[in-house]
Image: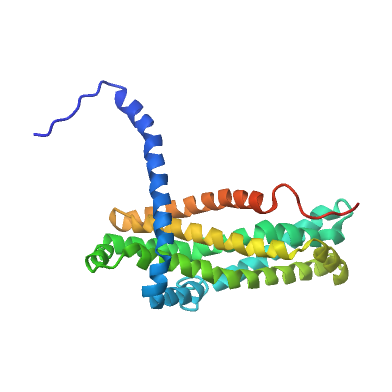
Amino acid sequence: MTATAFLPAGVRPVLAAADAPVQQAARIGHMVAFFFRTLAGIPLVLRRYPREFFRLLSDVTWGNGSIVVGGGTAAVVLLNGAAGGAVVAIEGYNALNLLGLGPATGLITALATVREIAPMMAALSFAIQAGCRFTAQLGAMRISEEIDALESLAIRPIPYLVTTRVLASALAVVPLFVVCLCLNFLVCQLVIFLVSGQASGTYLHYFGLMLAARDMVFAVLKVAIFVAVMSTLQCYYGFYATGGPRGVGIAAGRAMRASITIMVSVNMLLTMAFWGIDAGGRLGG
């Protein structure tokens, strides 16, 4: 017979409410520890698991060659970049044209797209296409006890399963983001030409006025950090999934929700760290 503690009526909900913040703080601490264990596994991956790393790099980038099911992130990132460029061009031109500043749409492309829109779109594309797959893969391995089998073979599961995926994602996103950004610029210029009929030289004048090499470097750094953090978070939920196939599905949903929330918060912090409150450009004296 198991001994139990007697709780008066109404006490149990109060204790549960008081314990919720403690459990949440413990979960956040566990995630942070998992993140640092993932980073600590980088030397081991480069030394002992390079073949697995390059296999995942190819899988993350290209997949099986399709666009949606089983595909890599390249097509998704490029399609989102083109669509985002068209939306920025149309809405930016319409808004500025109300003030008679339609030809200055290049300012928005050079500032908002490079600093905020393009990095977030690329990171979301990775989270949707590759991140969810990470959660499902690791969750399936957890419930089928494959991760336990790796430990029994003296293979450290976090470096082999998580660090390799995070490194592959962070490395794959850099060239894809650069190509996506160039495609975004071209689509913006084309749409402005079709919508307004203005000469490309006017658009390029304002575009070049605000575009800075430092912004490009910071944008690449932002998207690499976004993808690394989001991939780690989505691997975390898959690595500790419980409850069978249903639990894996729940973990994938929670991972996606947490990744988007964290990305927005990290974006705010990085924007303040890189650019502060100074736009870095001047329209006049």
Q: Is residue 168 visible?
A: yes
Q: Quadrant of residue 84?
A: bottom right
- Measuring from the top left, give residue 170's x and y in whole percent: 52, 66
In the shown orientation, is residue 87 left or right of residue 70? right
Identify the residue at the far left of this view: 1
- The image shows residue 14, relative to residue 145, as above or below, that is above
Q: Is residue 252 visible?
A: no
Seen at 49% across and 67% down, the residue is 169
In the shown orientation, is residue 110 left or right of residue 169? right
- The image shows residue 191, relative to residue 225, as above or below, that is below
Seen at 39% across and 78% down, the residue is 51
Seen at 42% across and 77% down, the residue is 55
How many numbered discs, if any?
0
Nearest to the observer: residue 153 or residue 149: 153
- The image shows residue 23, relative to residue 187, as above or below, that is above
Q: In which quarter of the image is residue 90?
A: bottom right
Question: Which image quarter is the N terminus in?
Answer: top left
- Measuring from the top left, give residue 89's x and y in whole percent: 76, 62
Identify the residue at the far top of this view: 8
- Measuring from the top left, give residue 185's x and y in whole percent: 73, 68
Identify the residue at the far right of this view: 285
In the shown orientation, is residue 43 left or right of residue 88? left
- Measuring from the top left, give residue 211's x and y in whole percent: 77, 63
Seen at 35% across and 62% down, the residue is 158
Color encoding of the figure: rainbow
Nearest to the observer: residue 187 or residue 266: 266
Q: Quadrant of residue 21?
A: top left
Nearest to the observer: residue 177 or residue 143: 177
